[in-house]
Image: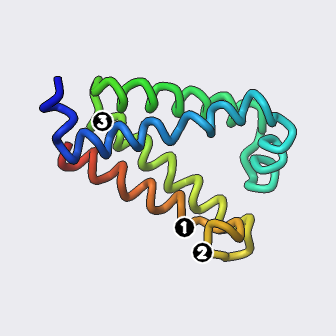
Amino acid sequence: MLNEFMDPLRVLAVLCGLAFIPHSVAKFTSREAVSQVFEKSGFRPVSLFIWVALVIEIVATVALVLGIYAAPVAAVAGVFMLLAGFAAFRVSGGKWNWVLGGCEFNMFWAACLFIVALWG
């Protein structure tokens, strides 16, 4: 089992999966703020898209951390993060920098997920 975690792609998959946890938690603890972001992004009906996002995030977390169908799940999660990045870019008025509300982090995360999907 230790050898499995010596593989850089496996480590990347686990990190990508773990990164979904705070996003999933926020959908339970900060529902109003999350709803506002989805509304501004144009995802309607908001509650449906929040639940779809939550399911994708939970499945991605479990699959990537445990190594269950990691490559196809990473591909789906990568597309999900690309969509999140485009939404952030649109809502931020075209900002790239993540700390200014831009899409930088989402795009980096999507790239990491695609690496896992293609070579994992």
Q: Secondary structure at mark 1?
A: helix
Would you identify the image quadrant in which residue 62 lies?
Answer: top left
Q: Residue 77 versus residue 8: which sits nearer the camera? A: 8
Which residue is at a point 74% across and 64% down the rendered structure image?
A: 91
Which amino acid does the dot numbered 2 rest on? Answer: Trp
State the residue at coordinates (83%, 44%).
33
Q: CA distance from mark 1 to mark 3?
A: 23 Å
The residue indicated by pointer 2 is 96
Q: Nearer the viewer, residue 5 or 24?
A: 5
Circle 2 residues within 10 Å: few <14, some 14–19, many ≥20: some
User: Disc 3 marks which residue?
Assistant: 72
Image coordinates for residue 70, horizontal then vertical, percent:
29, 33
Q: Which is more foreground, mark 2 or mark 3?
A: 2
Give the quarter of the image for residue 72.
top left
Place residue 66 in its image quadrant. top left
- In terms of sequence position, does the residue under pointer 1 or pointer 2 come before the other? 2
Disc 1 marks which amino acid?
A: Glu
Task: Decide if residue 18 is on the left or right side of residue 14.
Answer: right
Mark 3 lies on a secondary structure that is: helix
User: Where residue 48 sits: x, y (%)?
Assistant: 71, 30
CB of mark 1 within 8 Å of CB of mark 3? no
Residue 18: which disc? none
- Give the label on residue 104, or none: 1
Foreground: disc 1 or disc 3: 1
x 45%, y 49%: residue: 79
Residue at 17 percent across and 31 percent down: it is: 4
Callout 1–callout 2 Cβ contact below 8 Å: yes
